[in-house]
Image (tube, grey):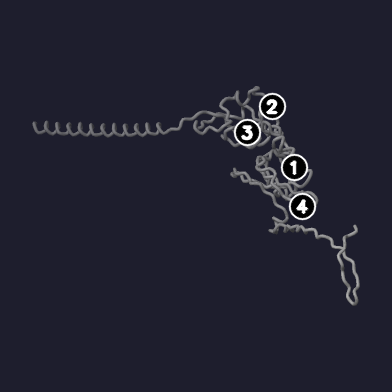
Amino acid sequence: MRGVFALVLLVGMGLAGFAVYMVQGFVSQQETALAQERAKTAQTVPTTQIYAPRRTITYGEPILPGDVTLIDYAIAFVPEGSFATLEEIFPDGEDVPRIALRQMEINEPILAIKVTQPGRDTGITSRLSRGMRAFTIKVDVASGVSGFLRPSHRVDVYWTGLAGNGNRQSFTQLIKSGVEIIAIDQTADGDRSGVSIARTVTVQVSPQDVGILAQAQSSGALTLSLVGDDDDSLSENVLVDQRALLGLAEDPVIAQVEVAPVDRVCTIKTRRGADVLQIPVPCSD
């Protein structure tokens, strides 16, 4: 009987110890999982909500309240010009839409530069910055970079013509650098695909530059040179004539030699025998 009691006691103590071990393991796992969750929470980036399209919106489409939705966006990386409320998007009322100036995809933040002002159309007036003016340049397949230009591209403008007094020579000079294009022919759509040969390119420049470009276009030919998207440098002053193009030296300067005046000598001839003599006499004049 005592042996059975001892056996039961040992089995009970073993089961109790096993139970304690299992509980400790479970508690340890829970603490580890809790610590991992706390670490993940500490690394979570704080976010805010801004508006984005709930569908793909193409150039020229109106944007209505049903076309937008709130998305979570990292606070540290919220782009400038985003909208956090419907009142910011539609300040004149939800029945006064904005128009898309470029294509926007689903969940792409809506920015002020991608849409018109409320109630405005997609004409070039909506793309002009404050204090800037639109100027149209006539181009062809060569001067228009073979049809690869698009609105929002930047170009350098070169002038070629005759200059100089008297002996006029042909020159090519850079007159404007990094000018932004706002329209090609009659469209301001920067998302159009394909290559087409433009007849006119409209750029935005200051009022002073309008005068420069107008004078240049009336007195010579304008050529555009496309600037890369990531190129923030300004082109240096460029002036090329035929001599610089061909690598010719400048015309040599012929020195003018002054000749000292010579005193005039007057003489008369007289014969003495077989000899003829010249005798100096005062000049009568």
Residue 261 in sight? yes
- Camera-side residue: 16 or 90? 90
Mark 2–mark 3 CB contact (< 8 Å): no
Kindly report which numbered mark, 2 or 1, lies closer to the viewer in this rendering. Answer: 1
Q: Where does the image place residue 236, in percent across and percent down from the top left?
A: 64, 46
Secondary structure at numbered mark 3:
helix
**Residue placed at 82% from the left, 60% from the top?**
263
Residue position for label 4: 169
**What's the CA distance linking mark 1 and mark 4?**
24 Å
- Camera-side residue: 100 or 257? 257
**What's the CA distance linking mark 2 and mark 1?**
29 Å
Residue position for label 3: 113
**What's the CA distance linking mark 1 and mark 3?**
24 Å
Secondary structure at numbered mark 1:
strand
Mark 2–mark 1 CB contact (< 8 Å): no
Instruction: Please report whichever mark, 2 or 1, sits nearer to the chain's N-terminal start.
Output: 2
Name the amino acid, label 4: Gln
**Residue furthest toward the top?**
93
Name the amino acid, label 3: Ile
Secondary structure at numbered mark 2:
loop
Q: Where does the image place residue 133, in percent across and percent down from the top left?
A: 71, 34
Residue 196 in sight? no
Name the amino acid, label 1: Ile
Q: Label 4: how many residues lie within 10 Å, few (<14), some (14-19) or many (20+)?
A: few
Residue position for label 2: 119
Q: Label 1: how many residues lie within 10 Å, few (<14), some (14-19) or many (20+)?
A: many
**What's the CA distance linking mark 4 and mark 2?**
52 Å
Name the amino acid, label 2: Gly
Residue position for label 1: 137
**What's the CA distance linking mark 3 and mark 4?**
45 Å
Q: Where does the image place residue 156, in percent across and percent down from the top left?
A: 67, 45
- Camera-side residue: 221 or 71? 221
